Amino acid sequence: MLDAAAKALSQMASPPFRTVLLKSMGLAAVLLIVVGIALHRLIAWLAGGGEAWLEGTIGPSAHLPLAILFWILAIVAALGLFVGIIFLMPAVTALVAGLFGDDIAEQVERTYYPDEAPGRAVPIGRAMIEATKIALLSVLVYLCAVPFLFVAGFGAVVFFVATAYLQGRQYFELAAMRFHPPADAKALRKRHQGTVFTAGLMIAAFVSIPIVNLATPLFGTALMVHMHKRLGGSRAIEQRR
């Protein structure tokens, strides 16, 4: 597993990966900016409406205290928004992986397994469905983990473990579906769920590093291509036809 991680990291700097790296990082950054702007506008709208309602209820004399209060709340909200974007990073990179996963997997197979039958690209519709499911499930799990953040940092542990499970699951299944039908890919992941989860811990650690985590789709896909080769082998494409 460590060898697979080392190969994934070393290949990220190779010329064939650079184009995919720039595209995936750019798309992830754009998605995060759009989400950040949308959340900021929502918070500003709610805060403005709340301040106007309270001032109308209490009276004009409350204008200055309310202005100060909502100014403080705006700062807190900005910090919360920053934390929220960090929590959303795994979900965003999951969507990006759905778009570029096959490009990455093809480069890994061509470099390290040239003598084996190559995988077949997962249909973009199927890839995006799987990526969207993981992204939505990620948001749901992370929302459930938020209350635990106030329990001596226990939420951070829940967040990390959940990220490892979800990211490991997605990247392994996308790599496996290049050689197996979706149902077989999921069954293979379940048979080796302990190993897949452990590999997912590496992806969770990677996605927790600011800026670098924009490249998570490359690292996660490359790592799981190697893991799939070790765990399940590569069924010839002809067997799927």
Image: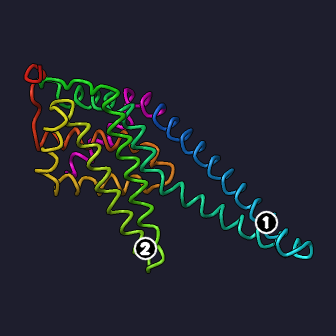
Q: Which of the two discs, 2 and 1, sits closer to the camera?
A: 1
Residue drawn at x 50%, y 40% as measured from the top left: 28
Boundaries of the magenta span: 1-22
Residue type, label 1? Trp
Q: How far from the left and from the top, in percent, is residue 211?
A: 51, 49
In this picture, residue 66 sits left or right of residue 32:
right
- Which image quadrant for residue 115? top left
Camera-nearest residue between 204 and 72: 72
Q: How far from the left and from the top, in percent, is residue 166?
A: 31, 52
Q: How far from the left and from the top, in percent, is residue 143?
A: 45, 62
Question: Which element is circle 1 on?
Answer: helix
Camera-nearest residue between 177 and 234: 177
Q: Which mark is residue 148?
A: 2
Residue drawn at x 20%, y 40% as measured from the top left: 226
Where 199 falls versus 13 (above or below)?
Answer: below
Question: Which element is circle 2 on?
Answer: helix
- Which image quadrant for residue 97? top left
Task: Looking at this view, name the residue that lies furthest to the right.
Answer: 61
Q: How far from the left and from the top, in percent, is residue 83?
A: 55, 61
Residue highlighted by disc 1? 53
